[in-house]
Image (cartoon, rainbow, N blue to C red):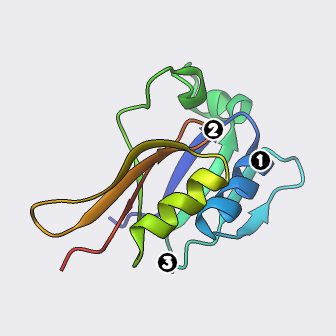
């Protein structure tokens, strides 16, 4: 078994793609003509980060779910990005419209981490790579 992709269910796929490019430098690599599905270029071969609109997601899952942007609190899951300069990445994301949740801090094990919440409700960790 191989990890293939993460799908984030959002209200507006194009808006999420545009935000992820502004905030994290991940350009859109695909947006379906329907606007219901899109992917960003993560730089990781074979692993996709994609977005799907709520109507399509609910049709696929055949159940309702808690939409991340409808919850006052972040959902209990995150997307993590490793970066060399966490403070700069944090400031870029906040300037692009992310909500600052936890400013950069160096953990006892030496890793620098920060957390932001995207306008679509997605929780994102920005961190240095583990040694």
**Is 43 above or below relative to 109?**
below
Residue tagged 3: 44
Is residue 55 or residue 71 the one in the foreground? 71
Residue tagged 1: 15
Badge 2 marks a residue whose secondary structure is loop
Q: Residue at x 63, y 38 (%)?
A: 120
Estimate the spatial distance between the alpha carbons at disc 2 and disc 3, rounded to whole Å: 23 Å
Residue tagged 2: 120
Pointer 2 or 1: first along the chain: 1
- Residue located farthest toward the right when viewing the structure as drawn: 33
Which quadrant is the C terminus positioned in? bottom left
- Residues marked 2 and 1 touching at CB (< 8 Å): yes
Estimate the spatial distance between the alpha carbons at disc 3 and disc 1, rounded to whole Å: 22 Å
| Residue 128 x %, y % | 32, 71
Camera-nearest label, 3 or 1: 1
Is residue 41 or residue 109 the one in the foreground? 109
Q: Is residue 51 left or right of residue 88?
A: right
Pointer 3 or 1: first along the chain: 1
Residue 82 in view of the camera = no
Q: Residue at x 76, y 65 (%)?
A: 30
Pointer 2 or 3: first along the chain: 3
């Amino acid at each position: 078994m191989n990890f293939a992709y993460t799908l984030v269910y959002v209200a507006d796929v194009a808006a999420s793609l545009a935000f992820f490019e502004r905030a994290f430098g991940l350009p859109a690599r695909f947006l379906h003509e329907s606007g219901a599905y899109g992917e960003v270029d993560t730089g990781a071969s074979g692993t996709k980060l994609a977005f799907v609109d709520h109507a399509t997601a609910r049709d696929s899952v055949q159940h309702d779910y808690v939409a991340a942007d409808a919850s006052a609190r972040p959902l209990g899951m995150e997307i993590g990005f490793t970066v060399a300069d966490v403070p700069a990445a944090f400031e870029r994301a906040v300037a692009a419209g992310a909500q600052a949740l936890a400013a950069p801090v160096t953990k006892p094990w030496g890793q620098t981490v920060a957390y932001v919440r995207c306008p679509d409700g997605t929780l994102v960790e920005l961190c240095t790579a583990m040694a």
